[in-house]
Image (cartoon, rainbow, N blue to C red):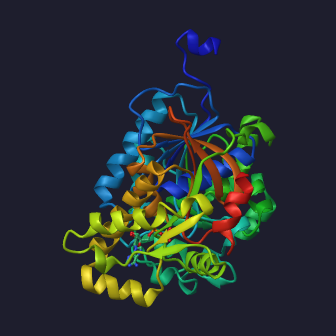
């Protein structure tokens, strides 16, 4: 604190820029578990960092924006992080490399490289704890290649090519190369050597293989001092040690939970469909919102109906409001409304439901879906989240302080979480 009082910046080690909200908490979770004190901000803060933390994750909602807008927001986040004294920058994207052929992973990476005057960075979405592994540049989700995992049907960023060197090269002017599993297995010196060789070949971005946490721990030391890292959340587990930090229980402590419980789900991923089915099969109250019902200015009326349904039920335990649907139904809604319009209508409605539920006394809220989480967090006016204990790999509880005691909230990325996530989450918090 004395350094702060004297007007110096806090000791910020890692400055992170995440392209969606659930991705930001996923990264923050891994950093906390590796011993860093972490604050996640919603968007780029307008004031300086107030407390001493080891890492800040700036959560953007830039994954599916036009590339120019995603770049502008990412550069604004970079400038703020630099002003706070961040020693290394980490651009975080999804562990399924969610992007369109236009980006935004490639364009944002290049803009950050230019701004940081660096000619080399890595790219790897590997997150073995969650079944995301990269082998010979190919991304696996669980036991199957990315394009067989359900991601080929994603409403906004369908992923049809599992070869990340190809996917990245299609989005980048810089040459893309590979640091393969054999090099990673040999550790820091071999990785340094490979990086030097790639640089000499004019490679600016190297996809890195990693099939285990051991790989990520071997990679970590080789990344010390690299101005920019681009990755999913997995790479984070190998970084705190570079700053002399070890895992500690204090890093994840949150205030005690209170208030009513609810789940809002707008993810249509395979995992979320199974979680919704599990919650319903358990006999717990659940209400579906259909995109078509929100057309012609009906959204507010639908939201009011949902809240009227929820109000008397909340005292009996968690309930679920969802637009989650199987691929066929999503395609039908998109054909009727257009892809962007269907997404926007549903996000807006679910965010209004989340706001209404909190107004009804909900203080423990599960949100499923990256874009959905972004919309809900914005509707709740949340500016900052303290990162707490993990529920499932990649998904921690968080706490958003407010004068009336605050809200515990968890932002679940579509494909994350066990089948009983919607009930288990509340048990973890209790
Ligand atoms: P995930 O984390 O699984 O990718 P997101 O919330 O990021 O989930 O993305 C899901 C997108 O699909 C959102 O834009 C959401 O509004 C939209 N969506 C949700 N339900 C439906 C539906 N039934 N039909 C069409 N689009 C939907």
398 over 421 or under it: above or below: above
Taking the image as drawn, is residue 314 in sight?
Answer: yes
**Where does the image place residue 324, in percent across and percent down from the top left?**
47, 76
Most foreground residue, 205 or 220: 220
Of 210 and 249, nearer the camera is: 249
Locate residue 247 relative to residue 28 in the image: left or right.
right
Q: Quadrant of residue 9?
A: top right
The residue positioned 44% from the left and 57% from the top of the image is 354
Q: Looking at the picture, tell me which residue is in the foreground, 182 or 383.
A: 383
Q: Quadrant of the N terminus?
A: top right
- Outermost residue to the left: 296
Residue shown at 60% from the left, 79% from the top: 280
Please indicate whether residue 365 sits to the left or right of residue 244 in the image.
Answer: left
Residue 282 placement, left or right of 276: right
Residue furthest out toward the top: 6
Spot the residue most to the bottom: 328
Q: Could one spot residue 109 in this view of the protein?
A: no
Q: Is residue 351 above or below residue 52?
A: below
Q: Is residue 312 above or below residue 38?
A: below
Q: Quadrant of ligand 1?
A: bottom left
Q: Position of residue 392 (x, y in %)?
A: 70, 62
Residue 116: percent from left, percent from top: 45, 41
User: Which x, y percent locates residue 115?
Assistant: 40, 42
Q: Residue at x 38, y 31 (%)?
A: 46
Give the total number of marks visible in the rendering: 0
Camera-side residue: 237 or 295?
Answer: 295
User: Which residue occupies the extreme front position in the image?
Assistant: 312
């Amino acid at each position: 604190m004395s350094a702060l009082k004297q007007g110096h910046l806090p000791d910020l080690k890692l400055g992170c820029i995440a392209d969606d909200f659930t991705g930001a908490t996923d990264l923050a979770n891994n950093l906390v578990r590796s011993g860093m004190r972490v604050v996640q901000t919603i968007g780029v803060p307008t004031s300086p960092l107030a407390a001493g933390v080891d890492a800040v994750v700036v959560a953007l909602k830039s994954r599916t924006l036009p590339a120019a807008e995603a770049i502008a927001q990412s550069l604004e986040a970079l400038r703020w992080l630099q002003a706070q004294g961040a020693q290394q920058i980490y651009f975080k994207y999804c562990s399924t490399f969610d992007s369109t052929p236009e980006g935004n992973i490639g364009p944002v990476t290049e803009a950050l490289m230019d701004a940081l005057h660096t000619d080399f960075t890595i790219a790897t979405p590997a997150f073995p704890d969650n079944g995301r592994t990269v082998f010979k540049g190919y991304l696996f989700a669980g036991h199957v290649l990315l394009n067989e995992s359900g991601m080929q049907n994603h409403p906004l960023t369908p992923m049809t090519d599992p070869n990340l060197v190809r996917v990245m090269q299609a989005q980048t002017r810089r040459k893309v190369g590979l640091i393969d599993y054999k090099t990673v297995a040999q550790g820091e010196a071999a990785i340094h050597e490979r990086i030097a060789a790639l640089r000499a070949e004019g490679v600016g971005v190297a996809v890195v293989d990693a099939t285990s946490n051991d790989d990520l721990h071997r990679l970590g030391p080789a990344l010390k001092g690299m101005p920019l890292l681009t990755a999913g959340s997995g790479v984070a587990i190998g970084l705190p040690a570079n700053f002399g930090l070890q895992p500690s229980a204090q890093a994840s402590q949150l205030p005690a939970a209170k208030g009513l419980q609810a789940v809002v789900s707008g993810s249509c991923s395979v995992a979320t469909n199974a979680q919704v089915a599990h919650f319903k099969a358990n006999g717990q109250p659940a209400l579906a919102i259909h995109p078509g019902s929100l057309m012609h200015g009906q959204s507010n009326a639908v939201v009011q109906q949902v809240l009227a349904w929820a109000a008397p039920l909340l005292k009996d335990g968690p309930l679920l409001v969802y637009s989650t649907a199987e691929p066929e139904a999503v395609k039908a809604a998109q054909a009727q409304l257009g892809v962007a319009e269907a997404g926007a209508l549903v996000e807006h409605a679910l965010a209004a439901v989340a706001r209404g539920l909190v107004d009804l006394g909900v203080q423990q809220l599960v949100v499923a879906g990256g874009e959905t989480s972004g919309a809900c967090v914005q509707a709740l006016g949340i500016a900052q989240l303290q990162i707490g204990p993990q529920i499932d790999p990649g998904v921690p509880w968080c706490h958003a302080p407010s004068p009336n005691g605050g809200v515990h909230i968890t932002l679940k990325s579509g494909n994350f979480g066990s089948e009983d996530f919607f009930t288990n989450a509340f048990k973890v918090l209790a």
